[in-house]
Amino acid sequence: MVGIFESIATFQLAVLILIPGITSILTYNLLNPRKVEWASLPLEAIFYGFLNYVLWGWTEKWDCYLVPIFYFFVAPSLLSCLFLWLRGRKVVKKYIHESSSSSWDYFFAQKEDCLVVATLKNGEKVGGYFGGKSHASAFPNNDQLYIQWTYLIDEDGNMGDVIEQTKGVLINKDEYSYLEFYEIVRR
């Protein structure tokens, strides 16, 4: 039979490269959602898989039932985590473009507590505390924001007290004109 895989060795090499490559891509996209470029996926899978093979191919000589789990799933996932970690370093950021899908995703990926004021399209302002129990949607979902504590905002735009017994507020992208973020000053 003549075909793409003319021998078992060729097929095995393809599996040893493609499966870890796909695992790397899935892990990277899970940790850093982005628009999928279907045309480039095979090349990405081959790149990540080949890198995994170069780094960890020697483990196939070990006689241990955990080696396939490590080689096909753990190592490629760690490789994706390493790339994401490196992309977050200031030294590396000087030379590569930010990998976030949007400014929205970049800001909320920082996971910093802050005060948020949303100016609604009707001119009303809604504000509150964005903290550990708050949530911002990420790509590919529409920009929705859940703020865990809602504050009263006076006519001058100043935040007052927390609204009693509030469970927060959910703000959809099509309901606001813009958002303002304020650093929390701790005294």
Image: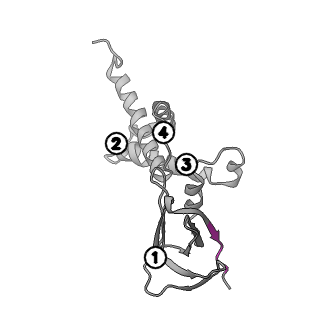
Whichever of labels 1 and 3 marks the residue nearer the N terminus, that label is 3
**Element under label 4?**
helix
Identity of the residue furthest to the front in this view: 122
> Amino acid type of disc 4?
Asn
Dots 2, 3 in contact, CB < 8 A: no
Q: How far apart are marks 2 and 3 (CA)?
A: 42 Å
Give the foreground label among 4 and 1. 1
Nearest to the observer: residue 114 or residue 47: 114
**Quarter of the image with the N terminus in it:** top left
Whichever of labels 2 and 3 marks the residue nearer the N terminus, that label is 2
Q: Where is residue 182 in the image (x, y as percent from the top left)?
A: 65, 72
Whichever of labels 4 and 2 marks the residue nearer the N terminus, that label is 4
Which mark identifies residue 52?
Answer: 4
**Element under label 2?**
loop
Picture layout, residue 59 above or below residue 155? above
> Amino acid type of disc 3?
Ser
Which mark identifies residue 101?
Answer: 3
Whichever of labels 4 and 3 marks the residue nearer the N terminus, that label is 4
**Element under label 3?**
loop
**Quarter of the image with the C terminus in it:** bottom right
Residue receiving disc 2: 63
Residue receiving disc 1: 168
The stretch in magenta equals 180-185
Location of residue 103 by image quarter: bottom right
